[in-house]
Amino acid sequence: MEEIEIAIIGAGVVGLAIGAELAQAGKEVYIFERNDTFGQETSSRNSEVIHAGIYYPSDSLKAKTCVEGNVLLYTICEKYGIPYKKRGKLIVAVSQDETDALEKLFERGKENSARNLKLIGKSELKKLEPYVNGIGAIYSPTSGVIDSHSLMRYFAGVVRSNKGWIVYRTNVVKIEKKSDGYKVMIIEDNKEHSSFRARIVINCAGLQSDKIAELVGIDIEKAEYNLKFCKGNYFSVGNGKNSLLSHLVYPVPKADGTALGIHSTLDIHGRFRLGPDDYYINMDYAGQETHTYPVLDLDYTVDESKKEIFYNSAKKFLPFLELDDLEPEMSGIRPKLQGPNERYRDFVIRDEEEKGFSGFINLIGIESPGLTASPSIAKYVNELIKN
């Protein structure tokens, strides 16, 4: 049976970032991914925003890794030519009722050490964005957008150039704790069964990370690791309306911090889109004829009936929009630890030694700001391994 040092399950942006960090540190790294290539799920179906770290509770992993990740991402982009645009973000209050919430959010951002934030009034908002409706805003100059595919390709290249491996079309189906690590059983190309031993296993399986934790023997109900799936649609905005904006423009978010609201982004090419919305869905684990293990039935169909909801929501701060500007674009699914009307939950990033699984590192509930936080999360996991 082959023996390896570190097995990473999942080649999304976080798994790849961790792989790159560990491979550069001289570790023997294998990344196992069930899809045909990297980043096919949450990592490629999002707003591609580089967040500043404004929204999250100050002592949370989300806040700490986002603020550090913001700096690290721009450094990586500059050094390695990864496309990005530091467009800046405006979080806009459209009524007096929202100004108190905006000021509280501004204070939270400062507590988190989000860089260069500024609270601005209506006149300054109009100078920055003449066509945006609002009575005040938080201005975040360090927010931006990134080509997430190019970032993941960079991380994958670092893994390979440091003698690491990425193995695609491979499902992990069983994990057994051994005295010297873990025996991991896999199915390759939906048919070939094999196994290996790994000293350390890192669970970065995204939408299926709770099920991977369950495979090793963790009671995910007791640990509160069971995931809830939250879908979000995006609509593109056409008819030349992208020329009317230069920043990312967001509404004041939900008070509970569970969602940022339907917002507008301009990607690195200047394409204008709205989204995502957020609503919980049920996804089935269904056996298929070619599989002997459960697989998620992922439905990325855009709900076109939501077009008017998007329009009415965005029209409050983007008054130039017309309903026929909007066209369905894509959707994504977020792996959340909190369900509808439940309390805010932070990232889970921990070595499960206390549960009897030393060397098994869980990353569960890695949703927004996971893309921004990815290089910081990688450093955090490297420290867990060192310790």
Image (cartoon, grey):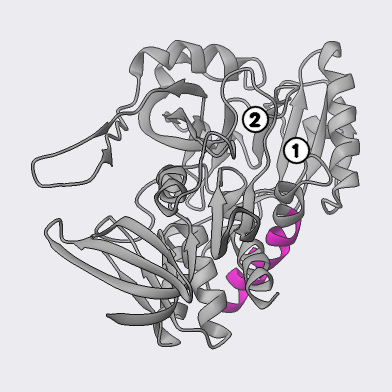
Q: Is residue 100 above or below residue 263?
A: above
The amino acid pointed to by label 1 is: Tyr
Query: Residue at label 2?
Result: 260
**Which residue is rendered at x = 51% and y = 30% of the image?**
276
- Secondary structure beneath dot 2 equals loop
- Which residue ends up furthest to the left in the rendered image? 289
Q: Left or right: 316 with respect to 203?
A: right
Quadrant of the snapshot with the N terminus: bottom left
Q: Residue at x 59, y 36 (%)?
A: 224
- Please give left or right for residue 81 compared with residue 97 in the image: left
Residue closest to the eye, 172 or 62: 172
Quarter location, residue 303: top left
Number of numbered discs present? 2
Residue 158 percent across, percent down from the top left: 47, 79
What x and y, as percent, mark residue 194?
21, 69
Magenta region includes residue 76: yes
Question: CA separation, marks 2 and 1?
Answer: 8 Å
What residue is pinned by disc 1?
55
Q: Main secondary structure of the magenta part?
A: helix
Quadrant of the rendering where the C terminus is positioned: bottom right
Residue 33 in the magenta stretch? The answer is no
Q: Is residue 60 left or right of residue 73?
A: right
Check whether the beta carbons of the residues at disc 2 and disc 1 lie within 8 A of each other.
Answer: yes
56 w.r.t. 81: above or below: above
Boundaries of the magenta span: 67-80
Label 1 neighbourhood size at 10 Å, few (<14), some (14-19), many (20+)?
A: many
